[in-house]
Amino acid sequence: MSMTILTVDDSRTMRDMLRLALVQAGYEVVQAEDGVHGLEVLATSNPDVIVTDINMPRMDGFGFIEGVRADAKHRAIPILVLTTESDAEKKNRARQAGATGWIVKPFDPVKLVEAIRRVAA
């Protein structure tokens, strides 16, 4: 049975790159354009892992992670942050919000898939 990955990123190019890398690795992919849309998509899907950006309009990644973690139904879903940010303070804030891991853009598709396999195990 294939796993479903929810990707949340305001960049269409990044969403396309993520979809390509994940579909090639055999995953189902559902996508959202920002944190607000991500929570809406989450309400109608049941992803095994979430990959989210931090810097997005309407609701950033921190708010999105907190929103996911606020719902008991989604509390156990691993969340990987995929961002251009590498600041320790932001990493810490993401961890406190409930992020499982951190990947810096530009991402290596192989490393991304390895990270997803690690957190989904």
Image: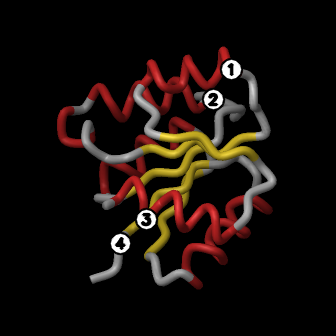
Give the residue type at disc 1. Ala
* Nearer-N-terminus badge (3/1): 1
Q: Is mark 2 on a helix, strand or loop?
A: loop
- What colour scheme does the image use? secondary structure
Instruction: Write down the residue under mark 4.
Output: 3
Q: Distance between the residues labelled 3 and 4?
A: 10 Å
Quadrant where the C terminus sits is: bottom left
Instruction: Write down the residue under mark 3.
Output: 117
- In this orientation, which residue lies closer to the viewer: 100 or 7? 100
Give the residue type at disc 3. Arg
Dot 3: within a 10 Å radius of its alpha carbon, few (fewer than 14), some, or many (20 or more) residues?
few
Give percent across and percent down for residue 97. 44, 22
Q: Is mark 3 on a helix, strand or loop?
A: helix
- Give the residue displayed 74% in from the left and 57% down from the top: 107
Q: How far apart are marks 4 and 1 (CA)?
A: 30 Å
Instruction: Write down the residue under mark 2.
Output: 58
Q: How far apart are marks 3 and 1 (CA)?
A: 24 Å
- Give the residue displayed 64% in from the left and 71% down from the top: 110
Dot 4: within a 10 Å radius of its alpha carbon, few (fewer than 14), some, or many (20 or more) residues?
some
* Nearer-N-terminus badge (3/2): 2
* Nearer-N-terminus badge (1/2): 2
Foreground label between 3 and 2 = 3
Quadrant where the N terminus sits is: bottom left
* Nearer-N-terminus badge (4/2): 4
